[in-house]
Image: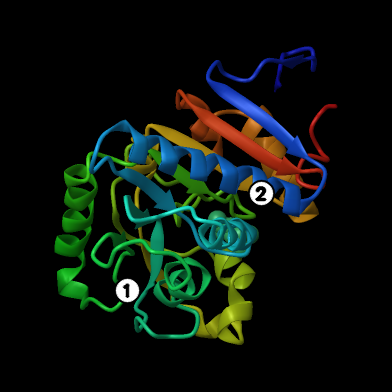
Amino acid sequence: MRESPKGRPTPLPSGHRLHRRATAHAAAVFVAEHIARVIEHHAGLRAGGRAVLGLATGKTPIGVYDELARLHEGGLSFANVETFNLDEYWPIALDHPASFHRFMHEQLFDRVDIPRGMRHVPNGSVPEGAIERHAADYEASITRAGGVQLQLLGIGGNGHIGFNEPGSPRSGRTRRVTLAAQTRADNAGAFGDQDAVPTHAITMGIGTILDARAIVVLAIGKRKADIVRAALLGPITEDVPASLLRTHRAVHWVLDADAASALPQ
Ligand code: PGA
């Protein structure tokens, strides 16, 4: 899939798989079923076996969470699941309608049975002086859980992963970051207007993300076609954070037809 100098597609890195699905729904179902298999695998490994998932917010994963809630109604237990979200706005109240804390409750946590205390989202309401400590504690909780086994990721229009905007260091850890203007514009809808979008966020770093044992990247819609192409076929560079995923050993790229539309057939 990577383009050779002559423009011919060459294979993706070994350990990477590209899954094209005709519709956004089919892509979401594919991802949810993959997550369900990871949960069941860890539940079946040994008594008390735990699946540690990295979770994402935004429009992209909503269909995945709907499908996971449906699978839960059908009997899938999340009792052995621990989750770590990628990011949260800062500053923001936990119960702000646009907070990722609230989003996760509405989209997933209130619909499945992940035990309380096992659902971690960076806290956007910590005072400025406590952010560094909170970020270090977040990293420590991931380590204590044994590391993230499967990280679900979307891609921002500018190539960000989590809130690691273009130029973020490949080795970065959880920390406070400044949001790019494009990100604030992309996310304005939830806040009413762009000026109401917080200027900062707390995000896992790219280094934190790349520590996950496996990663599933989901991209949906025409508006992601160009950035998907850049991430998969362009140079591997901190200017396109999603391109750094090509240095990871196990990534599933799951695309609907629109998001895949700028790739060679
Ligand atoms: P979106 O955001 O799912 O709302 O497109 C993706 C992202 O910013 O990671």
SS class, disc 1:
loop
Foreground residue, 48 or 30? 48
Residue drawn at point x = 22 percent, y = 39 percent: 146
* Residue type, mark 2 in image: Val
Asked if marks 2 and 1 touch (Cβ < 8 Å), the reply is no
Residue 206 position by quadrant: top left
Foreground residue, 37 or 198? 37
Which of the numbered marks, if any, corresponds to residue 201? none
Tell me the crowding category of disc 1: few under 14, some 14 to 19, or many 20 or more residues within 10 angstroms, Cα based. many
Residue 35 in picture, x, y percent from top left: 50, 44
Q: Identify the image's colour scheme: rainbow, by chain, secondary structure or one colour.
A: rainbow
The reply to whether residue 207 is visible in this rendering is: no
* Residue type, mark 1 in image: Gly
The residue singled out by tag 2 in the image is: 29
- Is the C-beta of the residue carrying label 2 under 8 Å from the nearest atom of ligand 1? no
Residue 244 in picture, x, y percent from top left: 49, 33
Gap between marks 2 and 1, in whole Å? Answer: 30 Å
Foreground residue, 226 or 84? 84
Foreground residue, 85 or 197? 85
The residue singled out by tag 1 in the image is: 124
